[in-house]
Image (cartoon, rainbow, N blue to C red):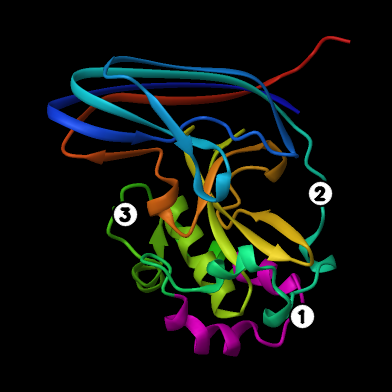
Amino acid sequence: MRLQIDVALDYHFPEAADVLLAVEVAPLPDQTLIGDLLTVAGAGPLRPIAGEDGIGQRTWLRAEGAVRAAYRATVDIERPSIPLDRLGIVPLKELPAEVVPYIWPSRYCEADRFESFVERRFGHIDGGARIDAMADWIRTELDYVPGSSDVRTTASDAFVARRGVCRDYAHLLASFARAAGVPARLVGAYAWQLDPPDFHALVEVWLDDGWHLVDATGRAPIEGIARIGIGRDATDIAFMTIFGTAVMNSQSVAVNRIVENS
């Protein structure tokens, strides 16, 4: 599947501020970047740095006054569909060193607070089917309500409120998985057919010998996901981190499938 991604960001910074921008598609084995271009008007020199675990990249800039950023990318997605229930949960002592950090609790994913609930509700389910059951539970029990949470909302908050947006669904699924001893990391992405179009958050879990995407919201097909970056929680995958203050004038994300004529 070939996707075209277009992003436009229009912000005003009343005072000079450092900004870490994460909007560029990450080149990965299952998503080939055909071409992309990031342009920023009204900001200082751009300085790219590697993303978390070397996946993708972020860009530092110094912003003041009117700042407009535009990003366009074309990406080919070739992602095999593997049912999670065919995959196994790896014993903790056999996990690769690089995935171990993703079993710990983090700022927004308080996995240790869910251990009793997860064992009681999902402990009888084997292998990757346990992750499917967690995602189904979240999708059923939570209401997707735009504006119902903010940057301070944690997985525990969403669990109690029984509502949230994609980052809350992802935080809760990552917390459940980690509580069950399954490494889980958050993914910032573009999503084909997401309505309304926006930046999207979902989860990757480590099963058998690899990372596998899971979207607890069920609002976009996995085969149409283009990953930007990964991390422990929303702190690591924010598309824009502002060290100061800013006012958003407008923001748009468009993800369209390119159908080639035969």
Picture residue at 74% right of the left edge, 59% below the top: 210
Residue 167 seen anywhere in this rendered image of the structure: yes
Residue type, label 2? Ser
Picture residue at 74% right of the left edge, 74% below the top: 89
Picture residue at 81% right of the left edge, 59% below the top: 83
* x and y percentages locating residue 69 in the rendered image: 36, 19
Foreground disc of the pair 3, 1: 1
Residue wearing tag 1: 126
* x and y percentages locating residue 8 in the rendered image: 40, 20
Foreground disc of the pair 3, 2: 2
Real-space CA distance between mark 2 and mark 1, rounded to the nearest whole angstrom: 20 Å
Residue type, label 3? Ser
Q: Residue furthest left?
A: 14
Question: The C terminus is located in which quarter?
Answer: top right
Q: Quadrant of residue 13?
A: top left
Out of 221 and 143, give the one closest to the viewer.
221
- Left or right of 208? Residue 133 is left
- Left or right of 171? Residue 41 is left
- Eyeballing the image, is 113 above or below 170? below
Task: Return the disc, 3 or 2, that comes first in the chain's sequence.
Answer: 2
Q: Which mark is residue 148?
A: 3
* x and y percentages locating residue 110 in the rendered image: 41, 74
- Left or right of 158? Residue 193 is right
Residue wearing tag 2: 81
- Eyeballing the image, is 18 above or below 236? above
Out of 50 and 256, give the one closest to the viewer.
50
Residue 133 magenta-highlighted:
yes
- In the image, the segment drawn in magenta is 111-135
Real-space CA distance between mark 3 and mark 2, rounded to the nearest whole angstrom: 32 Å
Q: Residues within 10 Å of mark 1 (few under 14, many from 20)?
A: few
Question: The N terminus is located in which quarter?
Answer: top right
